[in-house]
Image (cartoon, rainbow, N blue to C red):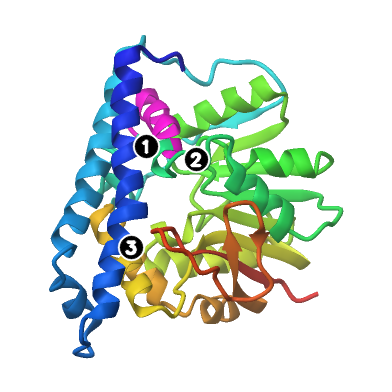
Amino acid sequence: MNLSLDERARLDFVLTVRRRWADTLYPALRAQYDAAPSTGDVAADVHALPAFAWFAFIERASQKMLWRDVMDVVGARPPSGHGQSSGPASLTLDPDLVLPDWYTGWDIHVQPGGVWRNDASADVYELGAKLVMLGGNDDYTFHRAFTDTAVPDAAYRRIVDLGCGFGKSSWPFKRRFPNAEVVGLDFAAPCLRLAADRANAAGLAIAFRQADCQATGEADGSVDLVTSTMLVHELPLEALAATLAESARILAPGGVLRFLDFALTGDAFRDLSMAEHGERNNEPFMPATLAADVPAMCAAAGLVNARWVAFDERGAGRLEAQIWPVRREWHFPWAVLEAEKPA
């Protein structure tokens, strides 16, 4: 997107505020926490620190500022008309699909109106998704590192990407496994229309389809790999359990599940900041999914060898154990949920 000088200045300003929140304010809050006596109540100890009020305020205020600026940028341009392009990608929408209240009842990520209302909301999401990651995912490095390092090399016939959004998580799979049939599923029709356009422009034969990840419409045992990126923490626990059960149903014997998401690190301060990030970022299900025993939920769904493995989004990708690198700045505790369907 070609930005005017004023638009670029506004976006650069909010991006700088968010970076200073992450690399300056968060370490200052951590230093205060480490120096203060502990009462045994981590939340109470953190909330009493001098820097906490600023940390919490800037986290939410900068997020709201970001989406307002992005909406102004998108709104200054002619309305988008996505889903009309031609090329190797396909698009199937379901006019009878009813979006659940837990999905439509929140402005997820504090994006006004969510991602599902109209084509402009998809454009806003696409631009905002880069800024939310503080400029570190401008070329979708996270998604490529996940596909390249966390997914076993195999002759996959069919890959299903749950919650694919505007397609950024689906593209790397088609590029790495060009002979596989790659299917991207999502609730949001506007995002899927944008996804099809982006895939057509890139010459990627991906089938985008509007569907519920709890009821994909895929046949029993028809999929070799089920994947998702940043979906687990967006689901209420009942929907997560149903999604894992659906994944187990559609996987072929020996099929692979690989989800990139977030997990608790065992650092009480770090884990609290992540749970509260969910609250301040309008991600209401994040605290519960972080606290849940998701590998046990995988086992209950009929999957085996379920575990979380740490992931370093800066390029290394999947790590060998559930041990996160020591880092000074605020960052997401990325992790890969791994499981398989019994052969």
Mark 3 crowdedness (10 Å alpha carbons): few <14, some 14-19, many ≥20: some
Mark 3 lies on a secondary structure that is helix
Query: Where the C terminus falls, by quadrant?
Result: bottom right
Residue 127 in the figure: left or right of residue 142:
left
Residue 308 in the figure: left or right of residue 115:
right
Residue lying at 42% horizontally and 42% vertically, measured from the top left: 134
Query: At label 2, which amino acid type do we have?
Result: Gly
Indicate which disc residue 142 carries: none
Residue 133 in the figure: left or right of residue 339:
left
Looking at the picture, how far across and down is residue 268, in whole percent? 35, 79
Looking at the picture, how far across and down is residue 126, in whole percent? 45, 32
Mark 1 crowdedness (10 Å alpha carbons): few <14, some 14-19, many ≥20: many
Looking at the picture, how far across and down is residue 53, in whole percent? 14, 60
Task: Give the labeled residue for mark 1.
Answer: 115
Indicate which disc residue 165 carries: 2
Residue 128 part of the magenta segment: yes
**Closer to the N terminus: mark 1 or mark 3?**
3
Range of magenta residues: 117-130
Q: Nearer the viewer, residue 289 or 88?
A: 289
Residue lying at 24% horizontally and 31% vertically, measured from the top left: 68
Looking at the picture, how far across and down is residue 91, in whole percent? 59, 29
